[in-house]
Every structure is written in C-alpha cells, then in structure tokens.
Amino acid sequence: MGREAMVGTRSYGQACPVAHALDMVGERWALLIVRELRLGPRRYVDLQANLPGIGPSVLAQRLRDLEAVGVLRRRTLPMGTRVYELTEWGGELEPVFTALATWGVRSPVPLTGVLTADPAMLGLRTFFGEGRRPPWTATYHVRLEGDSYVVRVVDGRLVELARDEPRGPVDATVETTPATFNRVWTGAEAIDDAIGEGRLSVHGDERAVRRLLAPTALPEAAE
Amino acid sequence: MGREAMVGTRSYGQACPVAHALDMVGERWALLIVRELRLGPRRYVDLQANLPGIGPSVLAQRLRDLEAVGVLRRRTLPMGTRVYELTEWGGELEPVFTALATWGVRSPVPLTGVLTADPAMLGLRTFFGEGRRPPWTATYHVRLEGDSYVVRVVDGRLVELARDEPRGPVDATVETTPATFNRVWTGAEAIDDAIGEGRLSVHGDERAVRRLLAPTALPEAAE
DNA sequence: CCGCATCCCCAAAGATACTG
DNA sequence: CAGTATCTTTGGGGATGCGG
C-alpha cells in the first residue's frame, strides 16, 4: 500500500553528475541491457536469452526504469512484435562503454564466462581503431549462431556495425561462433586455423575478411 | 560459519570487457567510493561522512572487494591513521568518470540532492578544458568547509587538483561552500554576488581566482 | 509463442548498537 | 577510529502461470 509514483527511488541523493548517472543506469543489469541495444533493437525474449541469469521480473523492471529516464523506448513493429531500442540520449552512453571496456579488458584477472554474440561484435567497434591497417572499403555480413550483423568499412575506418540482415550485396560473408570470432580478431588464434578446422567459414572476398579480422592488439593488461 | 573465500560472487558470468568491469566496480556504492579517492587518500570515517546513507557494513565490504580486485589499497600513515587510496590501476578509471559525468550532467532531469566537497572540485577537473581561457599560471588553495584542496594551473591547463594542504606559497586562497563554488564556476551565479554576500572569500591574487572560476559552459542538456 | 505478473526464497542493503 | 554484530527491509534469481 502507498505505492509511490517513483518505484526505483533508491537514489544516492547527491547533486553529482556521476552519482546522477548511476542513479539512472547504475542498477544491476541496467548497463548490460543498454549494451544489448547498442547494435540495434531487441525483443524481450532476446534480451533475456543474451543476459543469462537476469530473471523476467528484473528485466521488466529495468526496461520500465530505463524507459522512464529516457534511455530507451519501446516500439511496436508493423508485424506486431515489440522491440526495445535506445533513444538518442541512450546512444550517448557510447563513451561510457568505451571507457569501461578499455578498463575492463586490461584487468589483471582474466575474463571468464560465456561470450554472447553482441559483445564479440562490440569488441570490434571499441578496439578497431587501435590497429594500423591499409585504407580499404568493404561491406560484410557476419553471422554468429543465429545473430546477423552488417559491418561496413570505408577507407579502413569502421563506419557501421549493426545487428541487421544485409539489404544489398556484400563483399563477404563470415559465419562462425562468438568465441572464435573474438579469438581471431584479437590474435589469440590464427584465422587459417579457424578456417582449417571448419569453425569459421568465408564466402566472397576472403582477402577483405582477412583485413577485417587482422589481429588487433588490445590494450595490455595492467599491474 | 562456513565463510567462503569469495564473498562477492555475484558475477555476471560473461566474458565481455564491460560485464567484467561491472563485476569489479559495478556494485552499488563501489564507483562512488572510488570517486571519493580520486582526489587523494581518505580515512574510513571521511568516506562514510561523504557518502550519506552507505552504512558501515556495506562500506567495509566494498573496501574489501575493491582492495581484492586491486582498485585500491589500505595504507597506515606514520601517525597510525589508516587511509584508503587508489592503486595505479584504480586511477585508470578516470576516463570512466569523465564519460559518466559528461553523460550525467546532460540529463534532462535536473540534478538534486546534497553536494559534497569532492564532486564540486571534480567538476572542475572534468570540465575545465571546455572553456577558452588565456594561458596563465597560478597555484591555488581552495577550502570547502573542512576539506582543503590544491589546484595548479600552468599555461591555462589544469595540471593538478588534489585534496591536500598547500606545501609552499600559493597565489590565492579561496574559501566557500561546495554549492557556491559549483554555482560560480558553472556560471549559475556571478562571482561578485558570492563575494558581495560573503559566501565566498578570496585572499591573494583575485584576478587569478576570477580566471580559475570563469564560467565554464557545461555540455548542454539532451532531449 | 511473447511479454510479462506472481510467488517463494535467499542474498544484499539499510539502520542501529556495540566492541577492540 | 575502524570497523563487526545483529536485525529488518528490500531487491534479485528461479520457477511457474496466464493473458494477449
């Protein structure tokens, strides 16, 4: 009884920009939900599937909270399916993810756990600029176990990376698992080994794929 | 009894840099504790006083966790007082704070709550570069209700901002409250009004203080 | 199916008291 | 001063169910 209008009223109560940001996206799971929307809209079930352990009530609650503060909106597609997508304001969390990922990847303790499709692709978005590459141009279709992505590189710069089906012709199609994809572009595994063992397949311009997945040096571990 | 070695085992279980970073600093209060250490070491009681509502057990737990992952260390000063300070690895969270603060300050919903001393000073560190200023050089002593800070500007660039007592001569000393300090450098209040009403006092080079606290335009609100 | 709401249970956070 | 002990309250994980 006496339910107030604001449900998630567990504010830090500080007039500090950082505290205020954390009031909005600092709750458990909130930033990971936003991360799942960085590459495009997602449905409720897809969010749930890509956030193992979240539980339906918490997911619903966070989606409500994030919608209330204007980070995301819900939209109904023509065919009736409901999706959640970032607002422009939510999209401006990109530098937060870049900073967090750059810090987290340098952690002295190794990353463990499952690697879902989106983080594998997002690594490319975050760290692609680090490597020195020739200025080529190509469009790719990447398929990671059910998730489909379109990647566009123009003059050696990654200008588009979204969860989507290709609308026009692509230069190459890559099909593999999130883990193998990650191991290849980080240099942990040679692309030839992955292809040779049948864990990664390429259709189309294989040279272009080799350029895209050329080993990118991650920031080195701290301590 | 039966206390396990890992207490805070509530990992997201994902091999994603962002999830991994949040495993380390994503728990409630964790980033605000780190924020309190950005300007220098602090004692337990001072952390508690500057993080209203945290409660002693949660604070102790977070300090243990953050020490375990290498973000901070505890140190005992010659006179026997214990302080917590960031490790180098913890100091590298600076870009995360910059990104979070830049996003949070643009929030459509206004910042409310108490403003403690550190966030007031940290705003200067985060946003000082935004304004166009002449290249002057000066050392300041800022005192905000019990907290003492040293600020050094060289050629118009803020090269030092720490919670400390001045060790040598300073060009100017400023004494005020966190709120007034913030209102002046953000341009929400004219420095003359603050001085005139006795809420801000300057000793030494007042021209230098006017340069330091010249209104800095914050990133404008979104939506 | 999809998008949740409900329920149960445990773990974490808040509040207060107290101790080495 | 620097926490621990204890108690209460809230939030999160997991299963099930139900309306659209």
Image: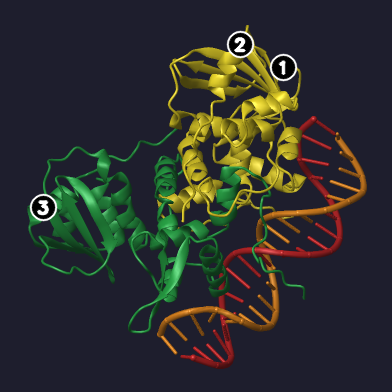
Chain colours: A green, B yellow, C orange, D red
Label 3, on which residue? Answer: A208
Label 2, on which residue? Answer: B205
Q: Residue furthest top?
A: B169
What residue sits 69% from the left and 47% below the top?
Answer: B113
Secondary element at tag 1? loop
Secondary element at tag 2? loop
The chain that hosts pointer 2 is B
Asked which quadrant contains residue A45, the reply is: bottom left
In this view of the protein, can residue B147 be seen by the observer?
no
Upstream in sequence: badge 1 or badge 2: 1
- Looking at the picture, does residue B22 appear above or below residue B180? below
Count residues near mark 1 (Cα–Cα under 10 Å), then give few for <14, some for 14-19, many for 20+. Answer: few
Give B109 or A77, whichever is nearer the viewer.
B109
Which quadrant is the N terminus of chain B positioned in? bottom right
Q: Name the kind of residue labelled 2 in the image.
A: Asp
Label placed on residue B78:
1
- Looking at the picture, does residue A153 appear above or below residue A168? above
Left or right placement of residue B159 versus residue B196 in this view: left
Q: Name the kind of residue labelled 1 in the image.
A: Pro
Place of residue A144 in the rendered image (x, y in percent of width and height, measured from the top left): 27, 65
Give A92 or B135, whichever is nearer the viewer.
B135
Secondary element at tag 3? helix
Place of residue B10 in the rendered image (x, y in percent of width and height, measured from the top left): 57, 57
